[in-house]
Structure formats: structure tokens, C-alpha cells
Image: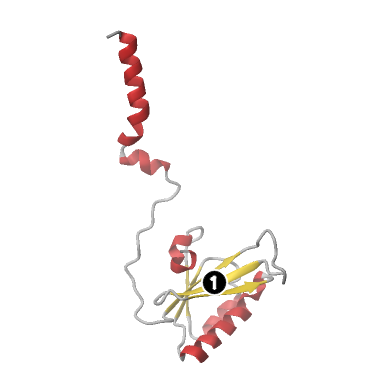
Amino acid sequence: MSKEFISLWSFWTSFFFFPLFLCMGCKLAKYLALPFHNSLSQTANAFQLIHSDIWGPALISSRSGYLFYVSFVDDFTRFTWVYLMRQRSEIPAIYQNFTVMIHTQFNAKIKTFRADCAREYVSTTMRSILHSHGILFQQSCPYTHEQNGGSRE
């Protein structure tokens, strides 16, 4: 065998098999964020924890002019409610209607409300609504939708 063939063979084998032998540090260095582990905390009853998220604006509005939607996900049952919105400012009114519907239809009260840092959730109007109903508000860290559990699964 010639030296050129051996060096060419070692080049091709290192080229094709190099990704299989990367060290863990090399793999972690390429991640934009570390992976999230599944939460061990579990709710015992329905409506003990509600996850919420806002999506939009859509590139094209619906025929009725809706550009946004908000989702509410029960942590225990994973049942999901989706409400369409024309503007993000409709969140407080939609949330009030949602809590009345939960109370009327299921004879239950929401204990904890978890959402991201969207300005509609942290507004004084929304905070006062949550406070008046005795609902705890949990905020996930910015740019970590994985923390908001069920609302983006």
C-alpha cells in the first residue's frame, strides 16, 4: 500500500466517523440552551394549575379579523381551551370569562395561573383580576417556553 492511499483512507474514515466520537463537552458547546428535564411536580386535582400562552400575530387574519389566540391548559387533565382574539389587549376580558365558565360548568376554582412574561399577563389589570379571585400567579423565565409546561406541547 502506498502512503497516499493510507493517508487518504485515514482522512475519509475520520471525516465520516468523527461525529460519532465527539466528547460530551463538544456536544454541549453546540447547544443554544441546556435541555429541560421533566418536572416532578404533579397536580392532584383539575384546575389546580392552568398554563397559558399567547400566539400571534398571524401573517393572515381570519375572515372575522382574528390575528391572535390564547390557550389555557389544565395541568391535571391536559384539557385545552383556545380563544381567538383580534388584539392582545383582550386577554383580561377573556380570562375573566374563562374563570366564570370554569366555576359555572365544573364548580371549581383556579388555584394557580402560570404564563410567560408577555406584557398582557404582567399588566396591572391582569394582576388585579388574579388577586381579586385569590389566584396565585407564576411566571416562567424569559425565552424558556419549556417551563410553561402544557401550553406549547
Q: Which of the 4 quarters of the picture holds residue 92? A: bottom right
Q: Residue at x 65, y 61 (%)?
A: 58
Q: Residue at x 47, y 59 (%)?
A: 144
Along the line of sight, the residue nearer the viewer: 124 or 101: 101
Position above or below: 151 against 125? above
Name the side, left or right, on which 64 lies relative to 113. right
Count every numbered label the image shows and give the total: 1
Question: Where is residue 55 shown, x and y percent of the image?
Answer: 59, 65
Question: Where is residue 87 shown, x and y percent of the image?
Answer: 68, 70
Q: How is the image coloured?
A: secondary structure
Q: Which of the 4 quarters of the picture holds residue 146? A: bottom left
Task: Look at mark 1 in the image and give the residue it sits on.
Answer: 71
Name the side, left or right, on which 6 lies relative to 50. left
Q: What amino acid type should be assigned to the residue bearing mark 1?
A: Ser
Question: Where is residue 1 shown, x and y percent of the image?
Answer: 27, 9
Name the side, left or right, on which 61 lies relative to 145. right
Q: Residue at x 53, y 84 (%)?
A: 99
Mark 1 Cα shell of 10 Å, populated few (<14), some (14-19), many (≥20): some
Position above or below: 25 against 18? below
Question: Where is residue 101 shown, x and y percent of the image?
Answer: 54, 87
Position above or below: 47 against 67? below
Along the line of sight, the residue nearer the viewer: 39 or 86: 86
Along the line of sight, the residue nearer the viewer: 53 or 5: 5
